[in-house]
Amino acid sequence: MAFLKDYISDIYRGIRSLLKGMKLTGYYFTHRKEIITQQYPDNRGTMVLPERFRGEVVMIHDENNEHACTGCTACELACPNGTIKIITKFDTTPEGKKKKALDTFIYHLELCTMCNLCIQACPTDAIKMAQNFEHSVYDRSKLTKKLNKPGSKIREGVE
Amino acid sequence: MLSIENIADSIDAWLNRAFSPSVATLLEGVLVGLGAITFFAVLGLVLVLMERKVSAYMQIRLGPNRVGPGGSLQTVADTLKLAMKEGLTPDGADKFLFNLAPFMVIVVAMLILAPIAFAKGSQLWDINIGILYVSAVSSLSVIGILMAGWASNNKYSLLGAMRSGAQIVSYELSAGFSVLSIVVLTGSLRISDIIASQQDGWWLFKGHIPAIISFVIFLIAVTAETNRAPFDLAEAESELTAGFHTEYSGMRFALFFLAEYVNIFIVCAIAATLYLGGWMPLHIGHWSGFNLVMDYIPSSLWFLGKTFILIFVIMWFRWTFPRLRIDQLLDLEWKYLLPLSLFNLLLMTLIAIEGWHF
């Protein structure tokens, strides 16, 4: 009899789990508001991307055209495929001491896999991922970007 | 009143007046053939679009929405594309069988159309063994599939065809037993008799729980027989690329595709005929007022409505359930469905003998 009981309870459980699945798809079928498709070129103006969407690496500049990059090259070392190249220079401080500073932050968008490791490696939160994803250009060289804006300098107090 | 029956009668009368009886019969045959082909083409377009929309909504997508209003012309565009493509025959293929197979499959699908009653009095061929004819002919489609798989000279095709063969042969049993249980209640194999016996209520409701069980078993079995997910092992995109029609392209591929959807329509039409009363309106016992209102809806609409609801249910299965393994598939048939349907048939016979049904 134990065999028969197992057999019948198998059938019952099987049918129950199948109906559970059908309930969910039935719910989706009748509730159009659940649809997650973005009709991209049509809704370009109103489209809201998820907060953590990774489009490209940018450097954060404040209103005084100051960034927080110390040129420590932690991001360059963290990058698995050589996307970032940092060129440093030596600034002279008012006291006459020489101090290492960022000259050019070169970012190869064409090599970047948006893995987010550089952002995690940055000790001063100088770079972040932007939401922009429309990267197509007609010339490959346009994908090699200089992230620090011209004339920008390091913010006071960032070490 | 305008109905399919009246139109057919007036065409028949006009042809008999204009030509001699034998010529008139021949012309009617040609007309019916043309009608069936047109019906098939329209059905294929509608069902493919329906499948794509239903699957999209079930997967929280939008589905085709660019070609025509709301994507309604998408399948027309697809068909035009397929018609213009090259129909390639592989070098190593058995050319004759390879070219014959798609036509075999589609002809079998067309043959089953004959005894189906589309509306009151519009049935192509009301033979006294209608339901037997349907189950006999529907098992022929496996020959077309095996032919396609073998002639392609491709291991995926052959594997798919073999799986399909095993599947159709096993699931025919439970489908047959489910059909039998309604035949037991009706006492006739003629489709018009089966429909007429449901005048005061459909068998699904009149036959108590055994009828419901046999209806569910029939739905499962025909889903397997038409090679649709969750029983689509014969195609199984992820394992066998496309199964028996891997090597087909262009219009011959379209024929396989069309045959699949026509087969779905046909099995759902048969399920509607057996369990939901075919073209018969919903009548509840002796509520004459309610029955009168229901009679105003044309019988062809009743038939198509029921069939399309069942088609929707089968699509619902497809877009919900994961595919079975071949051993699970055969387990389900031989260990669960077959004993259940045998026991169910016994119960049904008891009900029919004792007259317990309504």
Image (cartoon, rainbow, N blue to C red):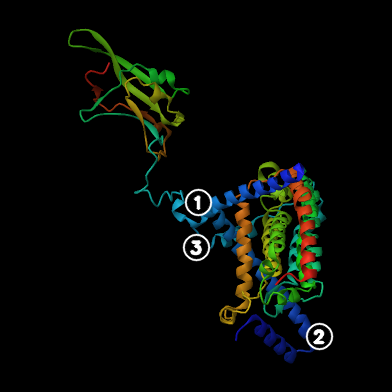
Residue occupied by mark 2: B22
Q: For residue B224, which quarter of the picture?
A: bottom right
Q: Please, which chain is the residue tagged with disc 3 on?
A: B
Residue labelled with disc 3: B68
Q: Amino acid at mark 3?
A: Gly
In front: mark 2 or mark 1?
1
Q: Is residue B83 left or right of residue B159?
A: left
Identify whether B347 is placed above or below B170: below
Identify residue type, mark 1: Arg
Q: CA distance from mark 2 to mark 3?
A: 45 Å
Q: Chain of mark 2?
A: B
Badge 1 marks a residue whose secondary structure is: loop
The one nearer the camera, B52 or B267, is B267
Residue denoted by label 1: B61
Residue B240 placement, left or right of A98: right
Residue B81 numbered tag = none
